Image: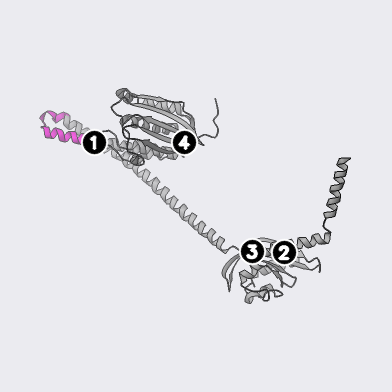
Amino acid sequence: MIRKNVTDGMQAKSAASAIPPEAAQALLSRCAVSIIESARNPILILNADRCVQYANPAFYGLLRTTSDETLGKPLFELGGGQWDVPQLQVLIEQLFRKGTAFYDVEIDYVFPEMRPRIFCVEGRRIRDIASEQPRMLLAIEDITARKHAEQELLLLNKNISDHVDQLEKANEELQQFAYVASHDLQEPLRMVASYIQLLEKRCGDSLDADSRRFIEYASNGARRMQSLIKDLLSYSRAGRDGAAVELVDMNEVFEHSVHGLAKLIEETDAGVTKGNLPSVMGDPTQFSQVMQNLIENSIKYRSDAKPIIHVSAEKKSNKWVFAVHDNGIGFDPQHSERIFQVFQRLNRRDENAGSGIGLAVAKKIVERHGGNIWAESTPGQGATFFFALPAPLLVRKS
């Protein structure tokens, strides 16, 4: 009973507050007028004679005209006939004759008083309830600035694309040159080294101290050049497409790298350990090269203490961040970017062997796989080399 009384009361209150149809129609009309009046884009209402019956403030602002100069005047005569646009005439004629509405039609036209403009126009038929006469609602949007911006953006994108193509071509040619030059240099250099050894073997007993020293200089230079050529070949290959991408177990990559460095590890009594490493997508051979180069770098720049190198990994966001930490001599943090450049060394050649290209190769491979590489260190307190690789979206368990 109580629920029924409440329901009856609500219905009675609703009926009492209901707006009569005529008042509702008037309210909707006032709301529509307010919306059109506040619109940022010009809006017109034309009658069957193509004369302007209504124009909102935005239209007056666009044409810099007044209502006295606009209302009741044919659209195509406004502003000295500057709206006499053939394309717009066709659209309006089709709308009044066939009722064909149009939307998002672009009109690119040289308006005498507004210079070249690009307008986006929409039109539809409406009916005057009082007179039952057909009317047309025409909305106009000035998209000149937007179109110019789009054209500039397209031109900019084309220029960027052209520059990228040129850079890719130049990079490809440079890699090809480095590969061919290095490959072609090996044979004559090998011949030079062989003849130096032969000269030392045959004439060693008859040579004085200066001659032996000169031969030693030449022999060392030949070996150093062979090492540089080998490393240059390795660097040029690092930028080429490797094997097909596959899911790579980085634990196996670590073991393969340690096996490749077994002699160096034994000679230096280095301790090389790892944590549990994840699997990532990539080229296993190139990943082994990265791991081996970083471990070898840590051993090469060791301190007087026993070399201790530890490899670990940590998941951060959508990437796996690998860390190769050592207790070596470290380096000044200001050189943290320079050490990844080709043929850049922080120590004299007589202090540490190598050409200074191993870290550059690692950087090139990591970036080719969509990752990045960096290093942190304090002189005398070791260094940590990090490289981040995208985490696989799905890892299938065997």
The residue that mark 1 highlights is: 222
In the image, is 176 to the left or to the right of 243? left
Q: Residues within 10 Å of mark 3 (few under 14, many from 20)?
A: some
The residue that mark 2 highlights is: 33
Q: Earlier in the sequence, mark 1 or mark 3?
A: 3
Q: Is 43 above or below relative to 70?
A: above
Q: Quadrant of residue 130?
A: bottom right
Give the residue type that dot 4 points to: Leu
In the image, is 31 to the left or to the right of 231? right
Residue 106 placement (x, y as % from top left): 62, 63
Q: Give the Cα distance between marks 1 and 4.
A: 38 Å
Q: Is 204 above or below relative to 140?
A: above
The residue that mark 4 highlights is: 389
Give the residue type that dot 1 points to: Ala
Q: Is residue 123 visible?
A: no
Q: Are marks 1 and 3 in contact (CB under 8 Å)?
A: no
Q: Which residues are magenta?
A: 201-220
Q: Earlier in the sequence, mark 1 or mark 4?
A: 1
Q: Earlier in the sequence, mark 2 or mark 1?
A: 2
Q: Quadrant of the C terminus?
A: top right
The residue that mark 3 highlights is: 41
